[in-house]
Image (tube, coloured by chain):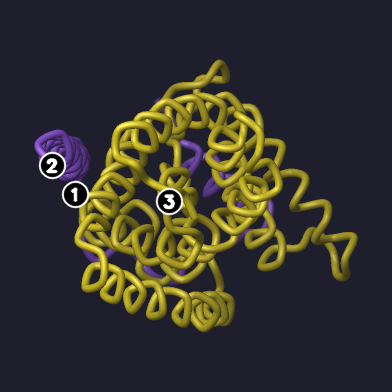
Amino acid sequence: MIGLDDIIEEKIAENFQYEPWFSPIFDPGELEILFFGIQAIIGVLLLVYFLWSSKKFRSTREKS
Amino acid sequence: MHISEGFLPPEWCLLWYVFSIPFIIYGFFRIKKLMESDPKSKSLLAISAGFIFVLSALKIPSVTGSCSHPTGTGIAVVLFGPVITSALSFIVLLYQALLLAHGGITTLGANTAAMGIIGPIFGFLFYKALKKHSISFFAAAFVADLATYIVTSIQLALAFPATEGFGGVLTTMSMFMGIFAITQIPIAFLEGLLALALLRYVVEHYEVVPA
C-alpha cells in the first residue's frame, strides 16, 4: 500500500521538477518491517513499565 | 507522514533546525529536572513516549488506498505540554530517520517542528480552552495530529510555491492539504478516541493532575 510520503514525493517531483539533494544514510529495504516492529516493541515496553509502576503506586497507597 | 530525506531545499532545512533546536534542548532539560524532582514523572514520561513510539509505528490504510500513521503526541501534550513533547517526538523522529529512512536527517528539524512543536502547541491550546469539558483529552490529541499535517503542508508550500508570492504558497498548501485530509482526518479521530481512553485511565488510577 502506498504511503502518504510516497504520494507527496511524487507530487513534488512532478509539479516542481525537484530532485532530492540528499539520500537516506541507511535504507532498511526489506528490514523495514523489522525496524517498525522494534519501534512498536519499544513503545509497548514503555507502556508496560507505566502499568507496572501504576500498579505499584496503587498497592503502596492502599497499604498506607 | 514526514517530509522525506532531501525533499526540502537546504535553506529550509536549516531554518527549521534553527527553529526546533531550542525547543528540543529545553525539552530535555525539563525532562531531567522533572525526573529529579518527581519520581512519579518517570512512569508518566514512559506512557507519553510509549504512545508516540507505538502509534507512529502503525500504518493505517485509508479509503483512497493510501496509508498514513497517527502522531501519538496527545498524551504527552496533556500530561506535560508542548516543550517536553518536542523532546519525546524528536527521539522517535530520529529513530525513524536513521533506521527506517522515514523522514530524514536533513528534514528532522522540519518534521520535529511539525509533529513535536507546532502540532502539540495547537493541541495544548485546544486542551486548555476546553479543559472544563469532557472532550478536552480527545481535542488535544485530535488537534495535535491534524495540526501536524497542516504545518507539514505549510512547510512544503513555503519551499515549493506554485507561483511567486503568497497566492502561490496558498495554491500549493491547498494541494498538499487536500491529499492529507482524506487520509488523516479519520486517523486523527481514532487517535483522539484512543488518547481519551488512556488519559482517563491515567488520571483516574494514578492521581495525575494534567498540565
Residue A35 visible in rendering: no
- Please tell me how crowded label 2 is: few (under 14), some (14-19), or many (20+) other residues with Cα within 10 Å: few
Q: Position of residue B27 (x, y in %)?
A: 39, 72
- Between B42 and B170, the residue placed more toward the observer is B42
Circle 1: residue type: Pro
Colour seen for chain A: purple
- Chain of the residue on which disc 1 is drawn: A
Residue B49 visible in rendering: yes
Q: Position of residue B37 (x, y in %)?
A: 26, 71
Give the quarter of the image for residue B96: bottom left
Mark 1 vs mark 2: tell me if same chain: yes
Q: Residue at x 62, y 59 (%)?
A: A17
For label 1, the SS is loop
- Between B54 and B66, the residue placed more toward the observer is B54
Q: Which residue is mark 2?
A: A64
Q: Which residue is mark 3?
A: B79
Picture disc at residue B107: none
For label 2, the SS is loop
Left/right placement of residue B46 relative to residue B143 reads left
Q: How many marks?
A: 3
Of the two numbered discs 3 and 1 in the rendering, the one whose residue sits closer to the viewer: 3
Q: Which residue is mark 1?
A: A28
Chain letter for the part of the structure drawn in yellow: B
